[in-house]
Every structure is written in structure tokens, then in C-alpha cells.
Amino acid sequence: MGRPTALNCACPGCNCTVKPETPFRSGVLLFCSDACAMGHPNGEPCHAGCGCECHAC
């Protein structure tokens, strides 16, 4: 078997990749964090210091 392909987080504005062993799901979409999967209900970032602007959606 080959290496798994890196997937991008489905959250708009997020540049993080989804870890195949620990994906966060919402329906059929995969996300890098629970915050992204939930749509950033409190404006929280997906990861501390990652630089993504997805929490501003």
C-alpha cells in the first residue's frame, strides 16, 4: 500500500490538512478540527497559531 494522500480541510479559509487517522467529520465532509467541523460557532480558531483565517467566517 502507498502513503495516504493529504486532504485539505473542507472549511472555507482553512489551509490545514486533514490527518487521515483522526478526521473530524460533518456529513461527508472532512475537517482538520472540531472547530472547523462545527462551523466555528464561537469564532474560535481551528488550531492555535496556525494562521488560518477560517474562524472569521
Image (tube, rainbow, N blue to C red):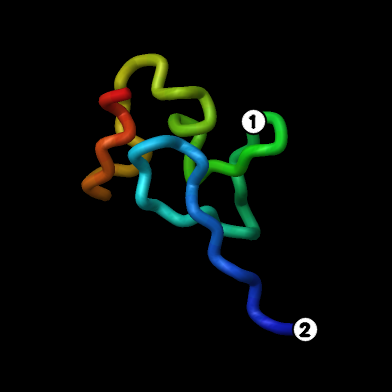
Q: Position of residue 19 (x, y in %)?
A: 55, 58
Quickly name the residue at label 2. 1
Outermost top residue: 42
For disc 1, the neighbor class at 10 Å (few under 14, some 14 to 19, many from 20) is some
Quickly name the residue at label 1. 26
Position of 22 with respect to 2 (left or right) is: left
N-terminal label among 1 and 2: 2
Which of the image's four quarters has the C terminus?
top left
Q: Residue at x 54, y 65 (%)?
A: 6
Position of 2 with respect to 19 (left or right) is: right
Q: Position of residue 42 (x, y in %)?
A: 34, 15
Position of 50 with respect to 40 (left or right) is: left
- What SS does tag 1 mark? strand
Outermost right residue: 1
Q: Residue at x 44, y 30 (%)?
A: 35
Q: Residue 48 is drawn in which quadrant?
A: top left
For disc 2, the neighbor class at 10 Å (few under 14, some 14 to 19, many from 20) is few
Q: Amino acid at mark 2?
A: Met
Which of the image's four quarters has the N terminus?
bottom right
- How far is the residue under mark 1 from the one under mark 2? 27 Å
Q: Amino acid at mark 1?
A: Ser
